Amino acid sequence: MIRVKNLTFLYEKNQEPVLKAINTTLNEGEYTAIIGPNGCGKTTLVKHFNALLPPLEGDVEVNGLNTRSKKSLLEIRRQVGMIFQNPDNQIIGMSVEEDVAFGPGNLGLPAAEVRKRVDLALEKVGLTGFETRAPHSLSGGEKQLLALAGLLSMNPSYIVVDEPTSSLDPAGKESVLALLLQLKNQGIGIIHVTHNMEEAAIADRVIVMNQGEIVADGSPRNILSRVDWLKSLNLAPPKITELIWELNQAGIKLETNIFSIKEAAEKIAALSASVKDSINCNMP
């Protein structure tokens, strides 16, 4: 469990706090999307989860380990892996297998254990057979998968990803998101910072931030169906949800918490059939 208690943080003295008394809890095996407008504090918050930033006030605990404790830093960073928008910034090996082996190798594990972890991590992300490839020869999506493999070789409890698909093509995005869901199903907590509401819709839970505070926390259906409110935060709702909202504004009454084209088609078809039946019943 990652427990955040009254977390406040600012980068410079006399500056408005970037985080203001944040309280939240994140669980293993839970997929949490964190959304909010630019500058609201999303990245600053998640950097506290693996102690990249120390709290100014309050505390962050990872499975009972306080991020203020220097003695706990290595274990906290093993348990909470983090991937940022540009994977090139955290790929350091001359080959795929060398890069994945870096983390467990620095733990002082026996060579056989390191080899086992590298092979298993590459298998999980679908990069088996890429062992001798140079990282710079990989596509953007493959680089993100490589960065994930490096984290998986450390056996983390949580993986934090900050806009991991923003520079990827559709195929790369699909690969990364599918893997995140797979890892969630294997019991790893996924914490996904994103501006893409379609990506947020696949999460178990959505946290909304604004001006350094958590302003909403709930299921995707409850959060992302609030189209007008999301727009007031300069957030673009899921396209299909916005379409349903616009239909309701035009007088065509449908459930507003719809997130898939298939679901929308079924609801519209049911409404059409109901209207047709009503017309037939009223005909002489």
Image (cartoon, rainbow, N blue to C red):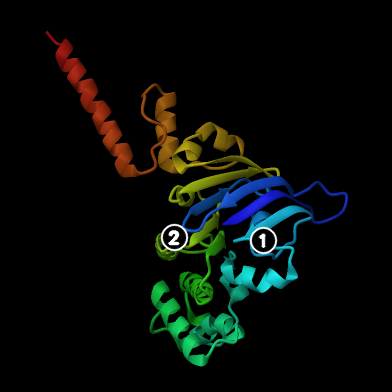
**At 55% from the left edge and 62% from the top edge, which residue is drawn?**
161
Q: Nearer the viewer, residue 146 or 160?
A: 160
Tell me if residue 52 comes above or below residue 221 in the rendering: below
**At 68% from the left edge and 70% from the top edge, which residue is drawn?**
72
Tell me if residue 173 comes above or below residue 108 in the rendering: above
Give the residue number, with chain letter if any, for mark 1: 47
Q: Is residue 16 left or right of residue 64?
A: right
Tell me if residue 107 comes above or below residue 27 in the rendering: below
**At 84% from the left edge and 55% from the top edge, which residue is drawn?**
12
Residue 135 at x, y percent in the picture: 52, 81
Helix, strand or loop at disc 1?
A: helix
Quarter of the rendering occupied by the N terminus = bottom right
Mark in front: 1 vs 2 = 2
Q: Nearer the viewer, residue 269 or 43?
A: 43
Please give the label number shown on residue 184.
Answer: 2
Question: Is residue 41 visible to the viewer in this orientation of the structure?
Answer: no
Amino acid under disc 1: Lys
Residue 86, image quadrant: bottom right
